[in-house]
């Protein structure tokens, strides 16, 4: 199984997703600041993967802080604050940081060396739990698909976006495991091309049929009957079911509705932010427009022309057919169903 | 004024649009077969520009055919047949070839040397008429825009897609000439990036504000109120108002309707094919999927993964707010209004 995040010998190893599919290179990080930069610079992306990466980044930081509790606590709080804002949109980052921080604040009596062990255990537990959650949500989602389907997906919500197995692609993998015949239409997902580079790469490795299309083709594909279902991941889901995900997701959702095609969001409950009542409150990361204009070494537009780069958009809940979590499938009204799903995750 | 097509000294000069904006190079073509290849290989693109280019290609061919009428006629018919199928979707190509061919068949008494002069005159007349048509349709369309507007456009329906001035961008230019404050959001238009490369280039040259966005951002831009109107060109329009245009146009039309934003198509009457009752009859060019996967020198997806590349899509008439032609603006029901616009063009 592809796992883009590995931790051993006090070193965090990240598969450098910026270089895929041409090069399969692992970065070895020993400094928490390197982890913050790796998240910011898209070495690792995908909401669940960012969460687990951040947790290991805090483990690295904990190893370097002083051995006395007050100084440790102060330094750890400061590191948590910096780690939490490496990227703004995915809630899993804040969620993972909060979990790590809570461990420290909840055990004032523990020694720093004890804390270090607990923090590493916690990060490992998150990593394992993420894969398990993806397998579980994958199997819930797979039941929603027909026996012979073409699934359109946007961006990469796969093994590479998580600790492994994937969310949207977890649904695809689980359907294949159930013996269904699934082929995937992968939006290339400009500007970062996660679909062409990452989704195609991991599906090809698993032998799952995948055809890449440019982002402007999904409407035509739906219009000509080539799409049976849309499954995407999420970076943050508000309490009312509004979904923040990679820029372009909203368009796909509008088009799916126009053509009567189900639009599914696959995400672990850690992606659900019950504290936000609607998607209007989700901060949208604005990245540098040059990332749109420069492909490889070449600048596509003439100098003097600028580009916009909102990295995410909000799909309103009314366009979402169902939200697939590890504890089951939520449908509208989401205010209620998402709370039930989240409560089930915490054993509540 | 940017004019991508020039003919002098029995040589057709084409601005090589594949190299823009990095390089401004002109190809000099003396052989009709080179012209066919230039059309097929996208040196020149855009329905009206293809039509004028094909006409000059036939002029080049006429210069090389035998001086006796029967042999000339046979060779010219054969060349016309090859030229007409250089690309399948744009109707202006067939329209221009038919006009040139009609000149020959209608004047059986003319000498071959006389025909050569007549054919050159006809091609020049088409070129001049195309610019005039674009100015006229531009001014009809400009009246539909507010005084301070952001226009979203897809692909390049500008000076580079025509003999000059442009269709969709002709509307923008005319609005600017009327003193309106216009800024343009240019879909980059994968895979060929006509928006980032060509639309941005020619608007920047004219000092008209232009921001490039990836194709998956237009929904978000409309959702956040950043778009006042959509104006696109067309490659072929059926009698019922269905519009074939660059892949992705259909998606933009669905999104415009979703947000109550007017969706205008700007095209000369030569783009209207009254012989096709609906868009279902318009052939959609399927290009090589490798054109999607390879950007610059680099292949974006792993080897073994394929891509689809339908080059055009069909926007149903119900999504089209108005079709702007050189003889005036057509609105639904298009069966009637398009006939009136075409009749006005031929003085009928």
Image (tube, coloured by chain):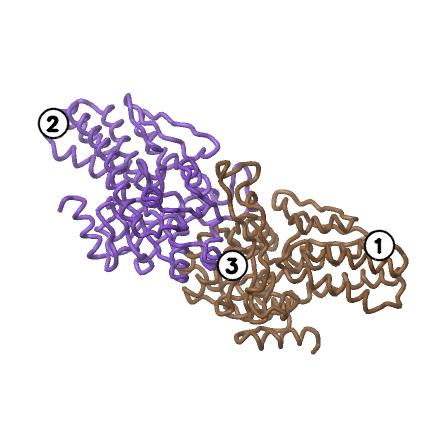
Chain colours: A brown, B purple
User: Is A9 or A295 nearer to us in this picture?
Assistant: A295
**Image x and y of residue A61, in percent:** 80, 54
Identify the mark at residue A63; answer none if there is no mark: 1
* CA distance separating discs 2 and 1: 93 Å
- Residue at the outermost left position: B109
> What residue lies at 50% left-to-right and 39% top-to-bottom?
A300
Q: How many numbered circles are shown?
A: 3
> What residue lies at 51% left-to-right and 41% top-to-bottom?
B294
Q: Mark 2–mark 1 contact, CB under 8 Å? A: no
Which chain's residue wears label 1? Answer: A
Identify the mark at residue A249; answer none if there is no mark: 3
Asked whether residue B128 appears in the rendered view, the answer is yes
Numbered disc 1: secondary structure: helix
Q: Mark 3–mark 2 contact, CB under 8 Å? A: no
Numbered disc 3: secondary structure: helix
* CA distance separating discs 3 and 2: 62 Å
Location of residue A225 by image quarter = bottom left
Question: B207 left or right of B65?
Answer: right
Discs 3, 2: same chain: no
User: Is B143 or B310 nearer to us in this picture?
Assistant: B143
**Image x and y of residue A131, in percent:** 68, 63
Identify the mark at residue B110; answer none if there is no mark: 2
Question: A325 left or right of B306?
Answer: right
């Amino acid at each position: 199984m592809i796992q883009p995040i590995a931790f051993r010998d006090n070193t965090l190893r990240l598969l450098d997703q910026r270089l895929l599919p041409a090069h399969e290179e692992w970065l070895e990080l020993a400094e928490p600041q390197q982890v913050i930069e790796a998240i910011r610079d898209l070495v690792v992306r995908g909401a669940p993967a960012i969460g687990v990466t951040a947790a290991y980044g805090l483990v690295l930081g904990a190893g370097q802080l002083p051995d006395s509790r007050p100084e440790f606590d102060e330094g750890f709080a400061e590191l948590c604050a910096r780690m939490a804002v490496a990227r703004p949109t995915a809630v899993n980052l804040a969620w993972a940081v909060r979990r790590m921080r809570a461990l420290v604040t909840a055990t004032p009596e523990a020694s720093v060396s004890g804390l270090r062990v607990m923090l590493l255990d916690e990060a490992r537990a998150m990593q394992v739990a993420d894969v398990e959650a993806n397998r579980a949500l994958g199997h819930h989602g797979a039941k929603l698909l027909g026996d012979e389907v073409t699934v359109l997906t946007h961006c990469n919500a796969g093994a590479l976006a998580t600790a492994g197995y994937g969310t949207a692609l977890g649904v695809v993998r689980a359907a294949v495991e159930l013996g269904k015949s699934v082929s995937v239409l992968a939006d290339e997902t400009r500007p970062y091309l996660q679909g062409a580079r990452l989704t195609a790469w991991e599906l090809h490795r698993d032998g799952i049929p995948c055809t890449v299309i440019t982002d402007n083709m999904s409407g035509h594909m739906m219009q000509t009957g080539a799409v049976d279902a849309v499954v995407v991941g999420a970076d943050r889901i508000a309490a009312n079911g509004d979904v923040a995900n990679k820029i372009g997701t909203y368009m796909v959702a509008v088009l799916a509705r126009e053509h009567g095609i189900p639009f599914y969001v696959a995400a672990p409950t850690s992606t659900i932010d019950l504290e936000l009542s609607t998607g209007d409150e989700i901060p949208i990361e604005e990245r540098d427009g040059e990332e749109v204009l420069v492909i490889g070494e070449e600048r596509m537009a003439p100098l003097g022309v600028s580009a916009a780069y909102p990295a995410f958009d909000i799909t309103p809940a009314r366009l979402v057919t169902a939200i697939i979590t590890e504890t089951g499938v939520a449908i509208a009204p989401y205010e209620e169903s998402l709370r039930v799903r989240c409560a089930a995750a915490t054993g509540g």
